[in-house]
Image (spheres, helix red, strand yellow):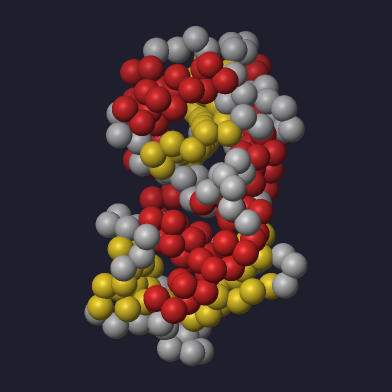
Amino acid sequence: MRILLAEDDVKLGKLIKRMLEKAGLAVEWVTRGDTAFEYAAYSYYDVIILDWMMPGQTGIEVCQALRKNGCQEAILMLTAKDDVNDRVLGLDTGADDYLVKPFEFAELLARLRALSRRSSAKLKEDVVQIGDLVLDRSTRSVRSKDTEVQLSSREFQLLDLLVQNQGRVVPREVILDRIWGLEADVSSNNLDAYVRLLRKKINVPEGEVGIQNVRGVGFKLEAQHVF
């Protein structure tokens, strides 16, 4: 299960992330509302956890913006506000569930499992085919013409990110942040090298799929057939 956690309380955020990972969940943690929106806009998650009060944008504002943007993933609001009107506001904004702080971790985990089971994000297939190229998220493997393509973890992440946003330009800064982290010492030249190597490895026939360099902006995957 992939979780996006948006919580600006560093101590609580670290604790939730550690406990969820201990339970076998994959967690990406951000501390700002605007960052949460950016992450959710360019990647898929089974459940998005939003704290009500955050810098950049509040959880309510992020929830509204995501729903307006077509996001269908399950959203769980975390808040210290336990007034009925606040709960109604959160749900009316588009949240699927609501958990009041402080809470027991077992309850959070149970709610995440329930949300994941009924999340429309489950409609997103784990296996995506682009011409002769097959990307399998469950096994993190890629095959081309029935031959397995050996990709590093970051190469797979890069390809998956481009596939998720097929037809849309993914900005360089978004790619660098999502795959290496903003604090990593990775330059645009390093990213260009990864893209060149990825193009060579997947070796998809010209015209079926291509990774385009949109000068000064980022990269876009264009494909004739995506199943």
Residue 216 vertical position relative to residue 23 in the rendered view, above or below: below
Image location (x, y in percent) of residue 141: 30, 63
Residue sticking out furthest to the bottom? 206
Image location (x, y in percent) of residue 151: 36, 65
Image location (x, y in percent) of residue 31: 62, 29
Q: Is residue 155 left or right of residue 193?
A: left
Q: In the picture, which quadrant includes the C terminus?
A: bottom left
Using the image as rendered, state which of residue 186 and residue 63 is in the foreground. Answer: 186
* Number of on-image labels: 0
Q: Is residue 4 left or right of residue 136?
A: right
- For image coordinates 49% across by 38% down, the residue present is 28
Q: In the picture, which quadrant includes the N terminus?
A: top left
Q: Quadrant of residue 221?
A: bottom right
Residue 72 vertical position relative to residue 159 in the rendered view, above or below: above
Q: Is residue 149 left or right of residue 68?
A: left
Using the image as rendered, state which of residue 163 and residue 157 is in the foreground. Answer: 157
- Look at the image and tell me whether residue 175 can be seen: yes
Q: Is residue 128 left or right of residue 221?
A: left
Residue 199 vertical position relative to residue 62 in the rendered view, above or below: below
Q: Quadrant of residue 61?
A: top right
Using the image as rendered, state which of residue 150 and residue 211 is in the foreground. Answer: 150
Image location (x, y in percent) of residue 53: 67, 22
- For image coordinates 47% across by 85% down, the residue present is 208
- For image coordinates 59% across by 68% down, the residue present is 192
- Look at the image and tell me whether residue 166 can be seen: no
- For image coordinates 38% across by 50% down, the residue present is 122
Using the image as rendered, state which of residue 172 and residue 45 is in the foreground. Answer: 172
